[in-house]
Amino acid sequence: ASGRKKRSNTIMMPERLSTQTIYESDWISLYADKVKMPEGYIIDTYHRLHYPHESVCVVIYNDQDEILMIQSKRYITGRLEWEIPAGRVEDAERPVDAARRECLEETGCILENPVYLCSQYPNNGMSDLRIHIFAARVQAEESAWDENEVNCKKWVKRHDMMDMMKNGEITCGASMLSLLYAEFFYRQDQ
C-alpha cells in the first residue's frame, strides 16, 4: 500500500504481423517483415536474414601451445583474411561432426576431443545465424587442404595471435570472438 505500481513480470516482445519473401535459397534467405514493437509502434519493413544452416568455428591448439590460423580467400572483402576454420553444419549433421569435417577439409587436421565452448548469434538484430564454437587439440595433421578456399595455414604462438588481432590482421568477427573465448574458457582449463 505504498502507492507504487506493481511491476509486471510479463515481457512484451516484438510481434511479426506479416512476411514478404524477397529471396530464398539453401544458403541464405531475405525477408521483409511487418513488425509490431512492444510499445505498439509498427515497423512496415524490417529486413530479416535467415540462414537455413547453423555454422561452426574451431580453435585448434598443438602441443607447442600454438593456434592454427588459415588464410582464407574472401570474395566479399576481396582480401586474404586470417581466420580459424569454420563452415556450415550440413543437414542431419551434429555441430561437433561439422567441426571435425571442416577442420579436416580446410586444414588437413584431425581433431582430438573437440570441446564445445558456446553458441553465438553474430548479428542478432537482423540475422538468425547461429555459430557453435569449439576448441580442440590437433591429433594428426595432413599436408593437404582445400586450396580453392584456403591460401595457406600457419601455427601461431598465442601472444602473436593476440598481436594479430590488435594490429588488425584478424578482422573476422567470428574468429576473433572464438579465439578470445577459447583463451579465457578453454585454454585455462587445459
Image (cartoon, rainbow, N blue to C red):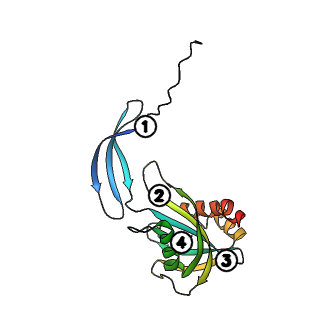
SS type, badge 4: loop
Up/down of 46 relative to 71, above or below:
above
Q: Which residue, given by chain and number where applicable, does mark 2 sit on?
A: 130
SS type, badge 2: loop
User: For residue 182, which quarter of the picture?
Assistant: bottom right
Q: Which mark is residue 13?
A: 1
Q: Which mark is residue 85?
A: 4
Query: Where is residue 39 shown, x and y percent of the image?
Result: 42, 30
Marks 3 and 1, Cα distance to the nearest angstrom? Answer: 45 Å
Q: Which residue, given by chain and number where applicable, does mark 3 sit on?
A: 62
Name which residue type carries label 2: Arg
Assess whether mark 4 and mark 3 are in contact (beta carbons under 8 angstroms).
Answer: no
Up/down of 66 relative to 162, above or below:
below
Marks 3 and 2, Cα distance to the nearest angstrom? Answer: 27 Å
154 or 133, which is in the foreground?
A: 133
Q: Nearer the viewer, mark 4 or mark 1?
A: 1
Name which residue type carries label 4: Pro
**Residue neighbourhood size for the residue with mark 2, other residues' Cα within 10 Å, grouped as few (<14), some (14–19), many (≥20):** some
Quarter of the picture containing the C terminus is bottom right
69 or 16, which is in the foreground?
A: 16
Of the two numbered discs 3 and 2 on the same chain, state the one appearing first in sequence: 3
Identify the residue at horizontal 33%, vertical 55% (top origin). Answer: 30
Of the two numbered discs 2 and 1 on the same chain, state the one appearing first in sequence: 1
Of the two numbered discs 4 and 1 on the same chain, state the one appearing first in sequence: 1
**Residue neighbourhood size for the residue with mark 1, other residues' Cα within 10 Å, grouped as few (<14), some (14–19), many (≥20):** few
